[in-house]
Structures are given as C-alpha cells and as structure tokens.
Amino acid sequence: MKIGVLALQGAVAEHIKSLQQAGADEVVPVKWPADLEGLDGLVLPGGESTTIGKLMNKYELMEPVREMAERGVPMFGTCAGLILLANRIEGQDWAHLGVFDVLVNRNSFGRQVDSFETDLEVKDMEGDEKYTAVFIRAPHIIEVGDQVEVLSTFNDRVVTARQGHIIGASFHPELTDDVRLHKYFLKMVDEAKQVRV
Ligand code: GLN
C-alpha cells in the first residue's frame, strides 16, 4: 500500500509519520505529477487552501489529482485539505478539486477563538475513547450532499464527513499521537484496492 502526502505546504512530515505509525507500507511526499504514480491513496494536509490551490495549479497537480479522485482513489483532506476537496465554498463561486459534495465555511471558528482542542466522538472509528481534535483556523461543513455521511460534529457543526472513498476533517489529526483516523483512512484505501483489483 503506497500513500502520498501532498507536500506543497503544511504539516507534511507529521502526516507521513502518522501514516507510518498507522501501518502504511510506503508513504511518499507529492510535489510533482510524477509523484502520483502508483499511489493507492492521497492525503491533503492543512495549511492555507488558497495558497495550496495556487501551488497545485502551478505544479500541474490539480487536474491529475482530480482525475485520480474521480477514478476512485481514496483521499483524506484535513483542514485546508478539506476545503480543497469540497465542491462548494461559502462566499465564492468556484471550488478547487470539487470532488467532495459538501459546502464548507472557511475559518468558521476563527472569530471566537483561533485554535483549540476538543474531544470528539467519531462514528465507526476503532476504540471507545474519544478522539482529541486540534482545530486551527478551522473550516466546518455547512451542508452535505445525499451521498455524504457525517462522522462527527462539534457544537452542532459537521467536522468530519465521508463520501465513499473521500473523507474530510476540519481539524489536524496529524498533530496528536492518536493515529486512529489515519488507520480509518488506510482501511478505506484497503477496501478501495480490493474493489479495483
Ligand atoms: N483557514 C485555512 C484555509 O482557509 C485552513 C486552516 C488550516 O488548514 N489549519 O485554508
């Protein structure tokens, strides 16, 4: 199982480490279109979505990543990565990859408080303990499409959701030692691989 981490900006090394701890065989940073070759899954980290989107266009990654998502290759977007996957962004009439049927609000928690941690219940995640989630100028999901399943909410706001092979989280799962969400993603990758074989 070979997983890529989009390495244009953000917490790339932390995601690579979490994926390795979660049991991925091979994890590679993705900077160029050639790095996408042979990937079974891709993680889109947090950072600043406008900047990452511009860099994806500049490095000619936008089209091939979209095409991979459309082919059913699992993708996991965290924070800015969730915004990149979304097909609707509040207050603007365009999206980035547009492969995840959700409406997102950027910087949803920003005004009240910039960064915070909270314990979440995440549907279908292994173990009984809650998951400590780190939010940094985080987006939230305002609306989900028919095919999208809500996995966790915080103060009635959707902060984790899944649509088949796509999963998005508002927070930063790579910044804690708890790798259960990365394990959940690797399970999605495993399932998708079996379907494709
Ligand atoms: N607020 C950022 C954005 O709109 C995302 C923040 C993050 O990834 N920590 O892109």
Image: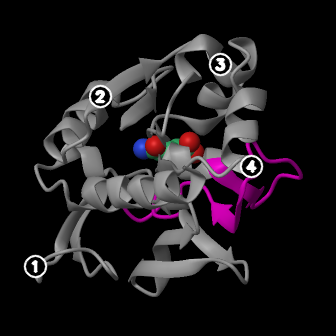
State yes or no: discs 1 and 2 in contact (Cβ < 8 Å).
Answer: no
Query: Which amino acid type is marked by label 1?
Result: Glu
Which of pointers 3 and 1 indicates the residue nearer the eye?
1
**Does residue 85 lie above or below 168 as drawn?**
above
**Residue receiving disc 3:** 55
Q: Nearer the viewer, residue 99 or 9?
A: 99
| Disc 2 packing (10 Å; few <14; some 14–19; many ≥20) | few
- Determine the secondary structure under disc 1: loop
Q: Is residue 163 magenta?
A: no
Is 32 situated left or right of 44 in this image? right
**Residue receiving disc 1:** 129
Query: Which amino acid type is marked by label 2?
Result: Glu
**Does residue 93 lie above or below 42 as drawn?**
below
**Residue receiving disc 2:** 26
Residue 119 in percent (x, y) is at 20, 74
Residue 138 visible in the snapshot: no
Query: Which amino acid type is marked by label 4?
Result: Glu
Query: Which amino acid type is marked by label 3?
Result: Leu
Q: CA distance from mark 3 to mark 1?
A: 38 Å
Which callout, 4 or 3, points at the residue further toward the start of the chain? 3
